[in-house]
Amino acid sequence: MGHNLGVAKPLAPSSRTARAVYLGLGFLCVAIGMVNLAIPGLPSTVFFIVALAAFERSSPRMERWLLEHRLFGSTLRNWRQSGSIAPRTKVVAITAIWVCIGISAWVVGPMWLKGLLLAIALALTAYLATRPSACG
C-alpha cells in the first residue's frame, strides 16, 4: 500500500553514516513510543512522528511499517498529509498535558517554575487545539 500523500519527500542522506544515524534514531523513537503506550500520561505519538521522519530518510520498509501499523498508522498518515489530529486524540493529549503538568506544578516549590509549567501547558494546548481535526 503506497502512501504518496502529496508531501515532498526529503532527500535521502548521501552517506551511509547519516542513514545509519537516522535508522538508529527511528528505532530508538519507536522503542520509546512503545514504552510510552503502556504508561498512561506519557506521550507516544510525538516519538512515532520523529521515527517516521527518521525512517523516511533511512528505511522505506520501516516507514511503510509505521504508516500501515494498525494502532498508530492512521494518526501518522493524517499528520503527514495535513498536519491534522483526530478530535479524540486532541482531547486525550490535552487532558494528559494538564494532569501531568498540574501534578508537577503542585509538587514543585518555586513560583517561577509553576509559572513556567503553566506557560508550557498553555502553549501545548494552543498548538494542539489549533491543528486541523482529522476525520478518523
Image: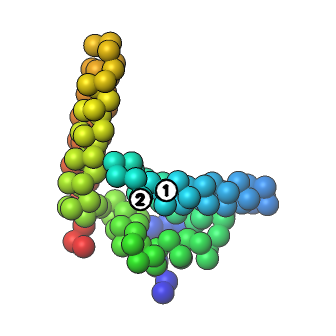
On screen, residue 122 versus residue 113, left or right, reads left
On screen, residue 84 versus residue 2, left or right, reads left
Whole-percent x and y of residue 128?
26, 49
Which secondary structure, mark 2? helix
Q: Examine the rendered structure and indicate whether residue 75 appears above or below residue 61.
A: above
| Residue that extends furthest to the right in the rendered view of this protein | 16
The residue carrying mark 2 is 37
**Residue drawn where x is 33% and y is 48% of the image:** 41
Whole-percent x and y of residue 115?
27, 20
Q: Examine the rendered structure and indicate whether residue 135 appears above or below residue 119.
A: below
Q: Examine the rendered structure and indicate whether residue 62 appears above or below residue 46.
A: below
The residue carrying mark 1 is 35
Whole-percent x and y of residue 99?
25, 40
Any part of residue 119 in sight = no
Density class for disc 2 (Cα within 10 Å; few <14, some 14-19, many ≥20) is: some
Labels 1 and 2 touching (C-beta < 8 A): yes
The kind of residue on which mark 1 rests is Val
Q: Quadrant of residue 79?
A: bottom left
- The circle on residue 90 is none
Q: Quadrant of residue 80?
A: bottom left
Q: Examine the rendered structure and indicate whether residue 127 appears above or below residue 32.
A: above
Whole-percent x and y of residue 43?
39, 50
